[in-house]
Amino acid sequence: MPELPEVEALAGYLRERAVGRRVDRIEVAAISALKTYDPAPSAAAGREVVGAGRHGKFLDVTLAGDGAPDVHLVVHLARAGWLHYREAFNSAVPLKPGKGPIALRVRLDDGSGFDLTEAGTQKKLAVYLVTDPGQVSGVSRLGPDALAADLGTFAERLRGRRGQVKGVLTDQEVLAGVGNAYSDEILHAAKLSPFALTNRLTDEQMAALHEATRQVLGDAVARSLGQRAAELKGEKRAGLRVHARTGLPCPVCADTIREVSFADSSLQYCPKCQTGGKPLADRRLSRLVR
């Protein structure tokens, strides 16, 4: 799933390449991906791309009209969505609704543009065309940005939602932008168990977690900015120390990276760095053994 660093990099790429161009048209191939109907996609035609940013893991492309209120193309890429920028499209024929990976296409006035695609069968990519990003319920419920929150705000938000730190850190209403992959990286850097309870973290542990969040996300953003959209997934994988590295040696202590599996996700951690050398119980595997 694209998280804060990748979405920030996609926004940066659009600022470099698309800002200043005008939208020729928006074509919707997956009707289920478009979550709004007013303004209609046709309202984007002729508007200038004047900005690109993000709200947590939501991408926000701002389209300005001549004297008309701005319109925002807000995108949540979900687990399997991505943005593919095209310098030119192979055909001028409009997309037709179908079962292909392309959900929506934005054509710009210089012949370039971008596709929003989604792999797999669980179609959860969401696109909104709104006059205010706050009209998107997922945006309006976001907590403070994980990369911008100071220590006081960070600690208050995490301690205000009692639970295992892994789950709380990825709750977008607590802090915006952190997902499964970077939470594993942050907890490894902070030397914390993913099952540690937020209300029992000491001030020292909370400060270490805050610093790790800023460091891990900041480093990932720095590595990602300037990369082409097609290169970002590989850049993310190359920078991971524990996530998706089950069975490999920890780059810090050389212990074996372990995994805990859930119904539709998993987490990775280093026992020596994070849990005093004690492996955590893999609940899904334990049920299978019984």
Image: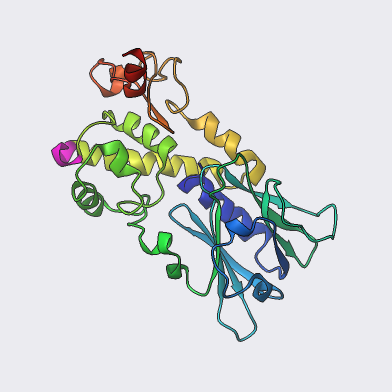
**Quadrant of residue 32 within the rendered picture:** bottom right
In this rendering, position of residue 157 left or right of residue 38: left
Q: Characterize the magenta stretch by its predominant secondary structure.
A: helix
- Where's residue 197, x and y in %? 19, 36
Q: Which residues are magenta?
A: 198-204
- Where's residue 44, x and y in %? 66, 73
Q: Is residue 228 in view from this perspective?
A: no
**Quadrant of residue 202 within the rendered picture:** top left
**Quadrant of residue 230 within the rendered picture:** top right
Q: Is residue 77 above or below residue 234?
A: below
Tag count in the figure? 0
Q: Is residue 238 above or below residue 233?
A: above
Magenta-span inclusion, residue 201 = yes
Q: Residue at the bottom extreme?
A: 67
Q: Is residue 71 above or below residue 35?
A: below
Color scheme of the displayed model: rainbow
- Where's residue 70, x and y in %? 56, 77
Looking at the image, which is closer to me, 145 or 218? 145
Looking at the image, which is closer to me, 33 or 192? 33
Q: Is residue 152 in view from this perspective?
A: yes
- Where's residue 55, x and y in %? 45, 58
Residue at the image position 62 percent from the left and 41 percent from the top: 119
In this rendering, position of residue 272 left or right of residue 68: left
Residue at the image position 33 percent from the left and 47 percent from the top: 171
Locate the C terminus by quadrant: top left
Q: Residue at the front extreme?
A: 290
In this rendering, position of residue 212 left or right of residue 119: left
Residue at the image position 35 percent from the left and 16 percent from the top: 253
Magenta-span inclusion, residue 74 = no
Looking at the image, which is closer to me, 25 or 241? 25
